[in-house]
Amino acid sequence: MSMHENAQALLAWIRERPEATISDIVESGLLKSRSTVSHAARYAEKSGALERIVRSGASARDRVRFRATGIALPEIAPEAQDTGPSFDGLLQAWGIAHRPVTLPMLEARRHQLSDDG
């Protein structure tokens, strides 16, 4: 699953609860590993879909909790999912043409070297 799909699954799960820790999510078996859960939570948090709640004085396991904000994850454009890397933006920023310019040729000369001396 992609990071976006993992974050969507995490949000669907966490919306059913008031709040949850990373350990709660891992124990549910929703995603494959703790690092996958952490990355999905970070992605959703950066998108504004999850809120991080830090409780001072709580144990290390319960210190950081997450709550859904009600904001949906941004949709990924279909062309962004299917295409590979593209340098079009760089070429445009540098002013490099996508297709080489065809220059008119006014005069052509052919030179041939020979070994006959």
Image: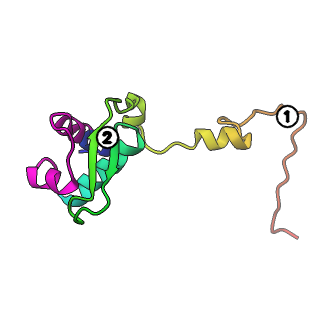
For image coordinates 37% across by 44% down, the residue present is 45
> 68 or 104, which lies in front?
68
Q: Which residue is mark 2?
A: 4
Q: Position of residue 17 (x, y in %)?
A: 16, 38
Magenta stretch, residue numbers:
8-32
Label pair 1/2, CB-CB below 8 angstroms:
no
- Rendering coords of residue 9 (x, y %): 20, 39
Looking at the image, can residue 45 be seen? yes
Question: Could you say which disc has been placed on residue 105 in the image?
Answer: 1
Whether residue 32 is visible here, answered yes or no, is: no
User: How far from the left and from the top, in percent, is residue 106?
Assistant: 90, 33
Residue 94, image x and y in percent?
72, 44
Tell whether 15 sits left or right of 54: left
**Foreground residue, 82 or 36?**
36
Give the class, few, some or many, for how many residues have Cα within 10 Å of label 2's Cα (few <14, many ≥20).
Answer: some
Q: Quadrant of residue 114?
A: bottom right
Q: Residue at x 30, y 56 (%)?
A: 55
Tell whether position 25 is magenta: yes
At numbered mark 2, what does the secondary structure look like: helix, strand or loop?
A: helix
- Looking at the image, is 31 positioned above or below residue 15? below
C-alpha span from label 1 to label 2: 52 Å
